[in-house]
Amino acid sequence: MLKSELFAARVPRYTSYPTAPHFYPGIDHTVYRQWLAELSGETPLSLYLHIPFCDTLCWFCGCHTAVVNHYAPVKNYCGLLIGEMTLVAQSLGSSGPVRHIHWGGGSPTMLDPDDIGRLNDHLRRHFDVASDAEFAVEIDPRGLTQGCVDAFARAGLTRASIGLQDCDPAVQKAINRIQTREETAHAITMLREAGVRSINLDLLYGLPKQTLKSWEETLRFALELAPDRLAVFGYAHVPSFKKHQVLIPEHLLPDLQTRLHQAEMANQILTANGYVAIGLDHFAKPEDSLAVASANGTLARNFQGYTTDTASALIGLGASAISALPQGYVQNDSAVPVYRKALLEGRLPVARGVALSREDRLRRHVIERLMCDLAVDLETACKRFGEAPTLLRDSLKGLATLEQMGAISVKGDQVAIAPDWRAAARLACAAFDSYLDVGSVRHSTSI
């Protein structure tokens, strides 16, 4: 088997386990309320706030978002978010310290400065936000205003995540995201001048009309911006799941071999320029907290990707937002009208979720360690969760092809992914996924 053929398998990105396709409606608002009430007042919390609006549709996008051409729906939605904060805080009773806050979308930078301040004030009123909490926001450089930057700075923004994707005009036209280099650079300058300490860039390979040469130019431009971190994702083309992706003709997409070369090129260029490779697809300066966490074994993974956040409870706020609690996962309604109806009726806007079994917790731990550390001790993991090592024997059999190709080594209960095969992390994790429907169209190719 050729190396590129191996990556044709469609497997999850493993930002949770079980993954979202396996959530079910039986986990409803009453269950979620009970789970929140069961949290100790000392339990550290993380907060995720979802803004499901954009002013244009990027054809590559896999997020829950909608295009709006006037601001009224956005302002009304902010009121709904505040209502959800109130219900969640009431269900919690006493709130543990909040160490991490993340605003995503959609485009949080669509918010006007007054609504940024209003949402931030209510978050801090309803939850015990630590004075040194990390506050990260996803930033669209296109049309970013000084007023928006200043409002986020006043709210305590510590890290900005800049969507760059690709800087080649032909690629940008093919994905309906026209973004000049000057816009990107100016956005970063505004953020740094406003005192934002950390900047990370999001890049995408596997895009239509993207060549190895144009991809290298994007990587070189990204280096000129000197970000603290980079996330280098492979574009997930799943038009059966995200209908607007049919606007990207498949014949314009790079083949698997090219995608593999693009991933390897990113690793080679970024590490040669002083960045540390982290997990599957992240890079950071050696002094960055993400690189430090990777080095000392405390790196974690959640719905935003790799993180230093080790809180046991992540509360998602907003339409489609997912909460990760010790008892399981809960996802809000994705449709804003349904989300609104629940809140107006005084209900937490839950659509579905999944309760975790002891085996789920074990497999989640194994998958997270493989994604973060590229290695795991199965015997130690089984002892930690009170399960017999024999439970994972079939999973080890599922690693045979990867082992034969030299991608991983299995020595007793020690499983390790070879450093130059980090792109195979998702494939290794899939062997431990007891829910996986291999080849599901809901998942993207593994490179």
Image: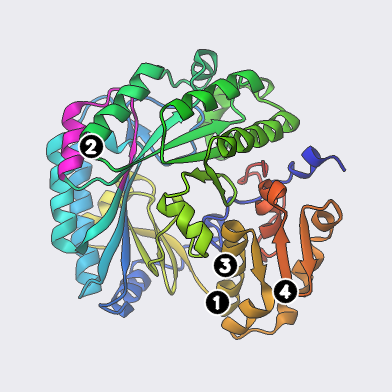
The residue identified by callout 2 is: 74
Question: Separation of disc 2 and disc 1 at Cα?
Answer: 38 Å
Question: Local crowd at mark 2 within 10 Å, few (<14), some, or many (≥20)?
Answer: some
Residue drawn at (56%, 79%), measured in percent from left and top? Answer: 358
Q: Nearer the viewer, mark 1 or mark 4?
A: 4
The residue identified by callout 3 is: 364
Question: Separation of disc 4 and disc 3 at Cα?
Answer: 12 Å
The reply to whether discs 3 and 2 touch (Cβ–Cβ < 8 Å) is no
Q: Closest to the observer: 280 or 226?
A: 226
x then y, percent, for residue 376: 65, 68
Image-quadrant location for residue 70: top left
Residue drawn at (36%, 17%), measured in percent from left and top? Answer: 182
> Which residue type carries mark 4?
Leu
- Which stretch did the figure color magenta? 136-154
Residue drawn at (59%, 36%), measured in percent from left and top? Answer: 272
Label 1 or label 4, whichever comes before in sequence order? 1
Above or below, 66 against 320 in this view is above
Q: Tag 4, which secondary structure?
A: helix
Q: Which of marks 3 and 2 is in front?
A: 3
Image-quadrant location for residue 100: bottom left
Label 2 or label 4, whichever comes before in sequence order? 2
Q: Is residue 87 visible?
A: yes
The residue identified by callout 4 is: 392
Q: Tag 3, which secondary structure?
A: helix
Please indicate whether residue 327 sits to the left or right of residue 47 in the image.
Answer: right
The reply to whether discs 1 and 4 touch (Cβ–Cβ < 8 Å) is no
The residue identified by callout 1 is: 357
Above or below, 213 against 331 in this view is above
Label 3 or label 1, whichever comes before in sequence order? 1
Question: Separation of disc 2 and disc 4 at Cα?
Answer: 47 Å
